[in-house]
Image (cartoon, coloured by chain):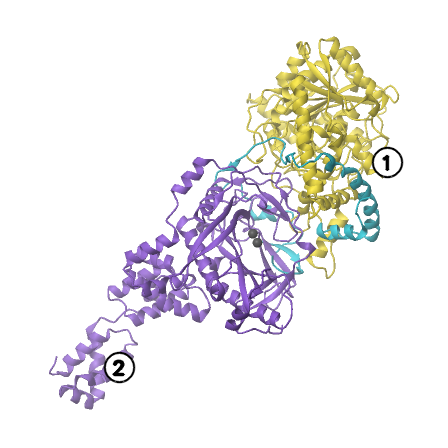
Chain colours: A purple, B yellow, C cyan
Amino acid sequence: MARAKLMDFDKALELFEPVIGLEVHVELNTRTKMFSPAANPAHADNHDAEPNTLVAPVDMGLPGSMPTVNAEAIRSSISLGLALGCSIAPSSRFARKNYFYPDLGKNYQISQYDEPIAFEGQVEVELSDGEIVTVPIERAHMEEDAGKLTHVGGATGRIQGAEYSLVDYNRAGVPLVEIVTKPIFGAEHRAPELAKAYLATIRDIAIALGISEARMERGNIRCDANVSLRPRGAERLGTRTETKNVNSMRSVERAVRYEIQRQAAILEAGGTITQETRHWHEDTGETSPGRPKSDADDYRYFPEPDLLPVEPSAELIDELRAALPEQPAERRRRLKAEWGFTDLEFQDVANGGLLAEVQATVAAGATPAAARKWWTGEITRVANVEGREPAELVTPENVAALQGLIDEGTLTDKLARQVLEGVIAGEGTPQQVVDARGLAVVSDDGALIAAIDEALASQPDVLEKIRDGKVQAAGAIIGAVMKAMKGQADAARVRELILTRAGAEGA
Amino acid sequence: MTTDITRLSAAQLAERLAAREVSSVEATRAHLDRIAAVDGDVHAFLHVSDRALDVAADIDRRRAAREELGELAGVPLAVKDVLVTTDMPSTSGSKILEGYMSPYDATVVARSRAAGLVPLGKTNMDEFAMGSSTEHSAYGPTRNPWDLGRIPGGSGGGSAAAVAAFEAPLALGSDTGGSIRQPAHVTGTVGVKPTYGGVSRYGAIALASSLDQVGPVTRTVLDAGLLHDVIGGHDVHDATSLPDAWPSFAEAAREGARGDVLKGLRIGVVKELPDSGFQPGVAASFRESLARLEAQGAEIVEISAPHFEYAVAAYYLILPAEASSNLAKFDSVRFGMRLDVPGGTVEDVMSATRDAGFGPEVKRRIILGTYALSAGYYDAYYGSAQKVRTLIQRDFDQAFRSVDVVATPSAPTTAFRIGEKIDDPLSMYLNDLTTIPANLAGVPGISVPSGLAAEDGLPVGIQFLAPAREDARLYRVGAALEALLVDEWGGSLLDRAPDLTGNDVKGATR
Amino acid sequence: MSEITPDLVRHLGVLARIQLSDEEVTRLTGELDAIVDNIAKVSQVATPDVPATSHPIPMQNVFRPDEVTETLTTAQALQNAPDADGSRFRVTAILGEEQ
Ligand SMILES: [Mg+2]
Ligand SMILES: [Zn+2]
């Protein structure tokens, strides 16, 4: 595939106004599926189930099967709608979206079409400099997820070139809420950043409501990004592309930025944008064309005759509204005060999309400062290197445990980074890594003294200097001892012992 | 003198079973023998259970152990192949599902088993219940026991013929636009389409979800009530199932048969369905029945249902639209037929399989339904048809303000010849003229034998319709008319059907 | 006359995943044309003031408690599979892309 020409981002923004729209799918963590009583793989208890073990007849579209609506999924959807500032429809309905695909057991998806459960809302999104942008929400509707296809035989594991595919219907029927924004105008050069911040906000809301596992790397939250450009001063919207399944926060930022640059280059050269879906490639940081919009997108929606309208009572809506957690902006103000962070410190956490992680780490026993240090520091560094999300690497509980090992003197900062590496590699909890790798600080003075004596004996000139009071010369001996101890010693203690052993004046 | 067990009604058989004059094994064997003797000609069954005698023996054992059993325990039952069963294949009359084994039972089947009924086999039907003649079965037509050259109605021709040919005392059917009532009409049997939601659809292979209802197919109104009592009532597996508490329909039938329920009963006759629209013998039988009811104190009231004339058109939009979606699951991926397409993509395999696996009528309706739902046509077709539904409901609401039940002939003609209409879908569709409005409005309907048409000597049925949830009214009125007619005839209409074994023996004994 | 053309029928065949032969397309075009002419009359009475009925008996809010019941075993799920690898269904190559 030839690389697309890209226009310089700033130049693209000079010539064109970007308009973005985001469709976010949130998997609910109910015990059962949207339309069947089978266990929900998006619930914490059911991760890693074997293929086709979480299926009821309707998930596979078996003859005679019928859907039934999960009451808890309705409550979660209403709560999410309310948290998005939406109106809850007095009457909403399910509809069938008809298309054939092997991962769709019935060959139609039960979704909502012209009567979604929630509509017309807005979400306040905070950008990196603390500016608050209001994103208008068009609707939030309930639907079911499709099964999972594994493509076998191709070089890449992708669909192209595969010999055959395997279908697992565990995910079929997982409850989803699809949140669709209205076109977002005026974000300008911050459109990519806004896309990312919006996604982080949706994730924060889902976590605060407790309605989703909200792990992006597991696909609990997935994003499609619509991007179009219009020439400065133009009234009409440009043709948009929809980049599908951009499934991390940093990717959505990159994908929006990429599409702006790509579309600008085409338009500037006198070309036209094709209305199509596009795929995001994490490895190359590019999008590639998918299927153009066509007659095949005739989904033949009609009201689902097997299900009845959803008409939540005012009492139910009031009850769920009363139980809503605080709004994201409010929550930020509260957390900042609680943690005692400076503006810069707090933005560091917020911009990294790490509020929930820091909060959970503090809840697990770490100080706010320690939690912030780990998440914005070493964990983010490793995540950037690996092109993953910090939250994917390690759990807040393990971060707190790691800090605990430092605080009790079992680990030095440097050792702790090695332990973290082991935790990320899947070697277990920090304590398990410490045990398995033998990484704890050597606190046995006998072993240290032996190493010190050996080092002093082999460097008599240094010993001489120390005895003469040139205490800083001890550094060379510390280095040798630390090397002998494979780094597993407390440098301050080693220094103390050296001075004692050398009989230095200052000791 | 030994009674021919197969000639007994289910109620009579149940009494003898309860009195231990007959065992379920004997009853089951008698019906299996009858199937072996006549089904080669009738072809009512697609599959005969090899477990029926074991199930019967189990009922006998439980009865011997003085276990509390349901009223119909030990009585054999034929099951329309549209209903999924764990112990027999379920094909819905289609090649695409040949050999399909369901991992679960339809709710009505599960309830029948729980009541101690003995499933004998699966009955033939038009493919996916699309048709009015059972000629569209992928497994060959069923023949009408009254004349083997004629159709037994459809789509549930197999269930009606099985009951009419004394191969089973009871059968389960499904009715989307008349598939229980029209076969009852042409075979001289009784068929009931319950109020929509009165009987669970779970496990009934869906044709048109907003129209489908499962119901009883029997030889007497009381038998229908007994079976309805077993299969009906709320089911959590079907969201459209009504949570209502239902009265006993068997009790309603008994009340109708003995009491004077006809006195003061107001029966509506639809002005827009004039006699001229029916075969003369059908119209004549209808009028005779009305006269008999009137003689017993019923009042015949002309009502107007101005939108009935749009019912067939609305039906042939709603049904294909829903069917096109319901039948999308037959795609060769998880079950059913798969054609080998060398080098083909999954799309190629799906398309080739669906072309080979579906018969012409099914393809016709899927394409029609796909069209009716397409962007740009939805409002004009599907949307308009749903509005016609509202208008027909209003017609019924209006009518039931002045009458207790509505009566119509059950179908326009008696059984036509096999092959006569197979190439004329439009005239085939008109067969359902009188039955369709009930499905569109969700109201219950019953077809009861009313006599034979003078011109061809073939059975005719009369249909009664009641307001939604008033199914009991149909059993009362149907049983009352049945009692009058049987009394007058000196036996059931089916006593006059030809014997199929070549022995010209009539009556209940031999 | 209605607007049913062979091209439209062929397109409907693609949407419905039925690989219609030329002969089937020709026959269906004629049949559908006649049927559609007949059923189009619904629009005569379907005026804007008439609400649509999609469900014959009005009900709403029919929900199921969020409790796991009645799940199939893998063996049951695969019982009728035309092709499978032991735990998953197997299909030939998929043209196109993930949705
Ligand atoms: Mg979408
Ligand atoms: Zn969606």
Q: What residue type is labelled 1?
A: Gly
If the image is split into quadrants, where does the C terminus of chain A sit? bottom left
Q: Mark 2 lies on which chain?
A: A
Q: In this view, does B460 lie above or below C54?
A: above
Q: What percent of the width, then of the height, locates residue A426?
A: 41, 64
The image shows residue B408 at horizontal and vertical percentages of 75, 22
Residue at figure coordinates x 28%, y 77% from the top left: A485
Helix, strand or loop status at disc 2: helix
Q: Which residue position is annotated with label 1?
A: B419
Is residue B2 or residue C62 the one in the foreground? C62
Query: Which quadrant holds residue A294?
Result: bottom right
Whole-percent x, y for residue B355 in the image: 76, 50
Does the rendering let one see residue B10?
Answer: yes
Packing grade of label 2 (10 A; few <14, some 14-19, many >=20) is: some
Quadrant of the image containing the N terminus of chain A: bottom right
- Whole-angstrom CA distance, mark 2 to mark 1, is 101 Å
Marking on residue B362:
none
Q: Is residue B353 left or right of residue A363?
A: right
Q: Say which residue label 2 marks.
A: A479
- Relative to A499, residue A20 above or below: above
Q: The disc labelled 2 sits on which kind of residue? A: Gly
